[in-house]
Image (cartoon, rainbow, N blue to C red):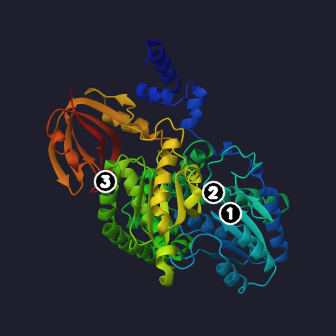
């Protein structure tokens, strides 16, 4: 920073009454006035945009009001990931407060596949008297034929989604998606559960206007923000603007653990007390919810989050825990082979990874892709064989179904658009996507995908470690941690700051499987540290090093402590 910038940050720190380092971090991230900084540090629910700015919202609300008046049955049709499950639970729980008969359907990824399907719609239509209302959440924006089929069977259809639209939008009775053409909603980055939340906001307002509720008797929508936080963080949405407001408030609700299912989930995850962060969702809560979806049992997670009884909720949470253990075992069987394939492709100089294991469980390919991002920082697609293979003509018709994850700065959906010649179908958003290709076309597709990655005009396809601040021995880690808490939630769009200590020594360095454990002397204190997937830095760690790291406050055996999480270890020059 220049002298002028340093002085400006000092004034900003005085205006905000915050430590200088926090003012510097805010300044570096573009919050250069006290007003901008306060808006970032203290996001308010009152600043949420009007839900009616979402195109199609008025029509969706009218359909729901008609359903209330005519006592129509409603089916919520969700997705089997955390975003889809939480959106399903949110709408189901809220609409039941309107004394409606509401059921939900979440596809089994093993037998039903993704999104709205003809077969599932047929089964649902046979269960309810027509006319009925079908509401999709976190899916449906590309289901043109399926929506038409549902309408032919007597359903009125509301599509709520946040994925990228295709060339044709379904002719549903209402479509609510911030990414559709002509939508003026100021945030295009909503999750599926975020869209569902704005729908209930709009419905509640209209029900109050029509006298169904008064302002004293209307539901407090804050109680649903724990679901919004779970789905938004798990789906790797950017935690800025509207999402930051929702997730910041939602984490407070998660921490209160009022919902029996959330309380039980936290108990099973070892989060029995203390503040729940976005990182806690990403690594402890969301994997348990996702596990049952990956293994074809998503209704267990929905039942957990809808449950009103703590004892029953604990039974569901235990089932999710067991599923997560099963998922981990399946992941381990595939991970070693995936890493070998990835290392070979890295040696070939590829800018992307395309991995395949025909016997890998389809429920873990997405998480294998995420693991590849952690290790190699390259956009990754992971494929497995389709159980619907045509045995009589396997060479030509075998399908490979894949799941992809991206890195910051690379829009995966647009990248796949640039190499869609060999893709049978795909969908998703900037950071994650699903796709299907023919096995015989995989080699050509892999080459096309790598070229598409290279062709994307990105500032940094392979981002290095960005250091936010150099620390010195006199810096207080406790003060840093307390200041960082005010910048939460961290995630996509608001990355956790990385600090640098130069010319330091690690102590008690040891390998823990593929990770690195150590102690770091800082001033008069020793701090515990870990470097995930950094076991190969063991030799470097034995000498004088420059250490890039993140600071964490963790709980160990009931006691809080500060930890260092290494992100880069380099020998001091």
Task: Name the foreground residue: 50 vs 499.
Answer: 499
> Could you tell me if residue 18 is visible in this image?
no
Rendered residue at 36%/46% (across/down): 349
Check whether the beta carbons of the residues at disc 1 and disc 2 lie within 8 A of each other. yes
- Tally the numbered discs: 3
Give the labeled residue for mark 3. Answer: 343
**At 55% from the left edge and 72% from the top edge, which residue is drawn?**
302
Task: List the residue tagged with mark 2.
Answer: 163
- x then y, percent, for residue 39: 59, 35
Q: Nearer the viewer, residue 118 or 246?
A: 118
- In front here: 33 or 332? 332
How far apart, in angstroms, are the residues tagged by discs 3 and 1?
Answer: 35 Å
In this rendering, position of residue 460 left or right of residue 188: left
Residue 215, image x, y percentages: 76, 56
Mark 3 in CB contact with mark 2 (< 8 angstroms): no
Q: Which mark is residue 193?
A: none
């Amino acid at each position: 920073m220049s002298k002028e910038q340093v002085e400006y940050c000092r004034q900003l720190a005085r205006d905000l009454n915050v430590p200088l380092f926090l003012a510097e971090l805010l300044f570096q991230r573009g919050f250069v006035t006290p007003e901008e900084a306060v808006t970032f540090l203290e996001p308010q629910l009152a600043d949420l945009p009007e839900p009616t700015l979402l195109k199609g919202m008025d029509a969706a609300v009218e359909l729901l009001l008609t359903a209330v008046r005519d006592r129509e049955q409603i089916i919520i049709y969700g997705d089997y990931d955390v975003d889809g499950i939480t959106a399903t639970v949110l709408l189901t729980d809220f609409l039941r407060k309107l004394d409606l008969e509401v059921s939900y359907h979440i596809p089994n990824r093993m037998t039903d596949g993704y999104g709205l399907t003809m077969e599932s719609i047929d089964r649902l239509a046979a269960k309810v008297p027509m006319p009925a209302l079908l509401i999709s959440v976190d899916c449906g924006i590309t289901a043109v034929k399926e929506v038409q089929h549902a309408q032919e069977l007597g359903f009125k259809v509301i599509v709520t989604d946040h994925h990228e639209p295709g060339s044709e939008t379904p002719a549903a009775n209402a479509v609510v998606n911030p990414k559709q053409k002509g939508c003026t909603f100021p945030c295009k980055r909503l999750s599926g559960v975020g869209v569902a939340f704005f729908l209930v906001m709009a419905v509640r307002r209209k029900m109050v206007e029509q006298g169904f509720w008064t302002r004293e008797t209307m539901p407090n929508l804050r109680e649903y923000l724990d679901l919004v936080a779970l789905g938004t963080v798990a789906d790797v949405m950017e935690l800025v603007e509207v999402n930051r407001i929702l997730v910041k408030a939602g984490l407070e609700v998660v921490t209160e653990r009022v919902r029996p299912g959330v309380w039980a989930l936290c108990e099973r995850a070892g989060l029995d007390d203390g503040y729940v962060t976005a990182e806690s969702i990403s690594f402890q809560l969301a994997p348990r919810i996702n596990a049952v979806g990956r293994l074809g049992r998503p209704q267990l997670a929905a039942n957990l989050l809808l449950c009103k009884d703590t004892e029953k909720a604990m039974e569901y949470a235990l089932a999710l825990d067991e599923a997560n253990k099963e998922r981990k075992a399946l992941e381990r069987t595939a991970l070693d082979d995936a890493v070998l394939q990835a290392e070979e492709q890295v040696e070939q100089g590829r800018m992307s990874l395309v991995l395949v294991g025909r016997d890998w469980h389809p429920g873990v390919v997405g998480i294998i892709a995420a693991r590849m991002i952690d290790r190699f920082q390259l956009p990754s697609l992971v494929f497995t064989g389709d159980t619907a293979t045509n045995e009589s003509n396997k060479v030509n018709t075998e399908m490979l179904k894949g799941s992809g994850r991206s890195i910051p700065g690379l829009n995966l959906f647009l990248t796949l658009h640039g190499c869609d010649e060999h893709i049978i179908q795909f969908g998703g958003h900037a950071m994650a996507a699903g796709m299907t290709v023919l096995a015989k076309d995989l080699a050509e597709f892999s080459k096309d995908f790598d070229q598409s990655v290279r062709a994307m005009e990105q500032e940094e396809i392979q981002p290095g470690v960005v250091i936010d601040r150099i620390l010195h021995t006199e810096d207080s880690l406790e003060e840093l941690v307390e200041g960082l808490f005010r910048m939460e939630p961290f995630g996509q769009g608001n990355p956790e700051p990385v600090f640098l200590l130069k010319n330091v020594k690690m102590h008690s360095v040891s390998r823990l499987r593929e990770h690195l454990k150590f102690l770091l002397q800082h001033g008069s204190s020793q701090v515990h540290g870990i470097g995930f997937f950094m076991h190969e830095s063991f030799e470097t760690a034995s000498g004088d090093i420059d250490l890039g790291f993140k600071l964490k406050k963790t709980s160990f055996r009931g006691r809080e402590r500060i930890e260092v999480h290494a992100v880069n270890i380099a020998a001091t020059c």
